[in-house]
Image (tube, rainbow, N blue to C red):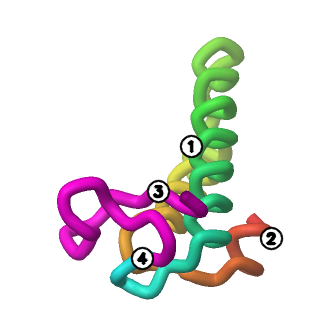
Amino acid sequence: MSMFCYQCEQSAAPGGCTVQGVCGKTAPVANLQDELTAALVGLARALDVKGHTKEGIDYIMRGLFMCVTNVNFSEDRVQEF
């Protein structure tokens, strides 16, 4: 299995998309989005301990929006973030 995505209503039933998304998302993009989400969770935990800032929260929100269904399928843009 090169990817696992069950994010949207288009996903292959019942287990999600495992090769390429029905929506057009590629395995590399799905994997990068998973990595970005995990990194943002780590940042949120750190901010929870150190104290939240508007900049930190805005950064997390922008990053999570890049991973929302059908918003961004660009490998380069996800890597740049």
Residue 30 position in % (x across, y down)? 56, 65
Query: Vertical placement of 8 versus 37: above or below?
Result: below
The verdict on residue 3 being magenta is: yes
Q: What's the residue type where badge 2 is placed?
A: Glu
Q: Residues within 10 Å of mark 3 (few under 14, many from 20)?
A: some
Secondary structure under tag 1 reads helix
Residue 50 position in % (x across, y down)? 70, 16
Q: What's the residue type where badge 3 is placed?
A: Phe
Mark toward the start of the polypeptide (1 vs 4): 4
Query: Vertical placement of 50 versus 23: above or below?
Result: above
| Boundaries of the magenta span | 1-20
Mark toward the start of the polypeptide (3 vs 1): 3
Q: Residue at x 66, y 30 (%)?
A: 42
Residue 59 position in % (x across, y down)? 63, 52
Q: Residue at x 47, y 56 (%)?
A: 4
Q: Residues within 10 Å of mark 1 (few under 14, many from 20)?
A: some
Q: Residue at x 65, y 25 (%)?
A: 47
Residue 16 position in % (x across, y down)? 32, 60
Secondary structure under tag 4 reads loop
Mark nearest the camera among 2 and 1 is: 2
Residue denoted by label 2: 80
In the picture, the disc for residue 4 is 3
Q: Residue at x 35, y 81 (%)?
A: 22
Secondary structure under tag 2 reads helix
Mark toward the start of the polypeptide (2 vs 1): 1
Mark nearest the camera among 3 and 1 is: 3
